[in-house]
């Protein structure tokens, strides 16, 4: 069986983990029937994933955070970029939140506009459909 015998640099390892969360969202949305597009480069537009139901397109930003609880503060990193949806995954746990893009500089994860989900397709899609 294949075994990885080399060390992965810390920055590279973090990038791989972050990308894996984006890939999960892509898979879940495709299984839900969305057309999914991945920008070659998202700098400037802050769009990790672009989805469409045909006539409509939505920009999604995926973020990962280490949080000790759902009152953890998250920063607005997409100001002036027209992001429609932000999905936060809590790396050190098994949950996340979905929220429409917001204009405040920061918010708590448990903000009333945020939809909390367990990190699985069924829970994610149930909350995504509530936006």
Image (cartoon, rainbow, N blue to C red):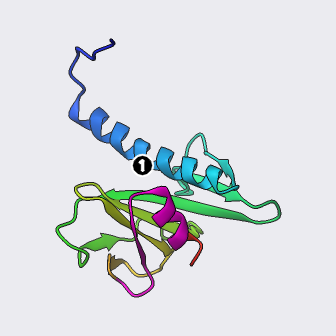
Residue 19, quarter of the rendered image = top left
103 lies above or below 3: below
- For label 1, the SS is helix
* Left or right of residue 5: residue 22: right
What residue is rendered at 33% in x and 77% in y? 106
Please tell me whether residue 129 belongs to the stretch shown in magenta: no
Q: Which residues are magenta?
A: 111-127
Q: Is residue 15 visible?
A: yes
* Left or right of residue 108: residue 61: right
Residue bearing the label numbered 1: 21
Residue 93 at x, y = what percent? Answer: 24, 59
What residue is rendered at 21% in x and 65% in y? 67
58 lies above or below 105: above
16 lies above or below 125: above
Residue 66 at x, y = what percent? Answer: 23, 59
Compare residues 7 and 70 and report the one nearer the observer. Answer: 70
């Amino acid at each position: 069986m294949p075994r990885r015998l080399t060390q992965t640099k810390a920055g590279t390892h973090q990038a791989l983990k972050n990308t894996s969360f984006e890939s999960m969202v892509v898979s879940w949305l495709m299984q839900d029937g969305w057309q999914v597009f991945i920008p070659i480069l998202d700098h400037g537009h802050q769009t990790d994933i672009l989805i469409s139901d045909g006539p409509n397109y939505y920009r999604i930003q995926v973020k990962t955070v280490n949080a000790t609880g759902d009152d953890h503060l998250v920063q607005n990193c997409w100001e002036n970029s027209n992001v429609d949806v932000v999905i936060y995954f809590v790396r050190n746990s098994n949950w996340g939140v979905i929220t429409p893009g917001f204009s405040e500089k920061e918010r708590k994860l448990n903000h009333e506009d945020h939809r909390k989900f367990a990190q699985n397709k069924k829970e994610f899609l149930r909350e995504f459909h509530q936006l």
